[in-house]
Image (cartoon, helix red, strand yellow):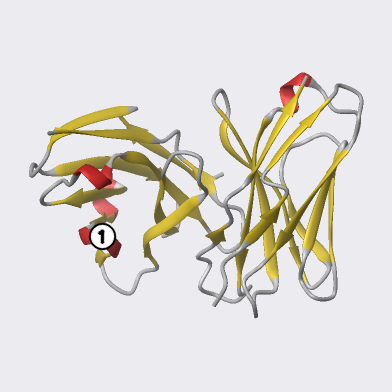
Amino acid sequence: KAGVTQTPRYLIKTRGQQVTLSCSPISGHRSVSWYQQTPGQGLQFLFEYFSETQRNKGNFPGRFSGRQFSNSRSEMNVSTLELGDSALYLCASTTGGTGYEQYFGPGTRLTVT
Amino acid sequence: AQSVTQLGSHVSVSEGALVLLRCNYSSSVPPYLFWYVQYPNQGLQLLLKYTSAATLVKGINGFEAEFKKSETSFHLTKPSAHMSDAAEYFCAVILNDYKLSFGAGTTVTVRA
């Protein structure tokens, strides 16, 4: 089975711009979660989608949003980028059942200048 | 809210020596616990998970972890370190939702 894929792998944006990141989960997985990883804050949960509905949300401002499509692929969007949004954004998928183990993609490295 | 604490941000071991990474959790109910490994410029790879079926959990690459409720711990061990074990390791906890809460991570270096 193919793993979780994320595109693009690297992005450079300017402050004030917006960005969209994409995640394709493992085939058959219906839950997709997003995490932000920075040296200062570590790994932080952004949000989780299941069957096109946001089921859980972390403590991030409204500039961070996401969605999930009927094929379980997910996108996250960050509007009005700030320097502090520079991070590795990780997507993880799981079946959505009781196993809870999440499988991660390689991440998208976002640099805001 | 549940959380995990990883003791020691850096661990240095000799090749062939025991690897011991410490993780303590705070939860009033038995949680689901995980260990992940991250190699440079990569995502996280699941090493093992505890889901109450057995207290001693065996994972990939020769790693295992023991759940001790009395100590609220879930320490990760490997009897003999290999150069390829050099990476960052994260302990994580989840209750009955899908919000993984991670520890700060422990970087392992392996000396030849």
What is the chain identity of the residue bearing mark 1?
Answer: B
Viewed as shown, does residue A80 lie left or right of A31? Answer: right
Is disc 1 placed on a helix, strand or loop?
Answer: helix
Query: Which sits in the foreground, A73 or B56?
Result: A73
- Residue drawn at point x = 57 percent, y = 51 percent: A106
Residue A9 is drawn in which quadrant? top right
Q: Is residue A35 visible?
A: yes
Quarter placement of the C terminus of chain B: top left
The front one of B47 and A19 is A19
Q: Residue at coordinates 61% horizontally, 63% vertically from top-left?
A: A4
Q: Quadrant of residue A113?
A: top right
Figure quadrant of the N terminus of chain B? top right
Task: Name the residue that disc number 1 marks.
Answer: B61
**Does residue A91 appear to the left or right of B44 in the view shown?**
right
Q: Position of residue A59 (x, y in %)?
A: 73, 38
In the rendered image, residue B83, in percent from the top left (x then y), is placed at 21, 42
- Residue type at the position of mark 1: Asn
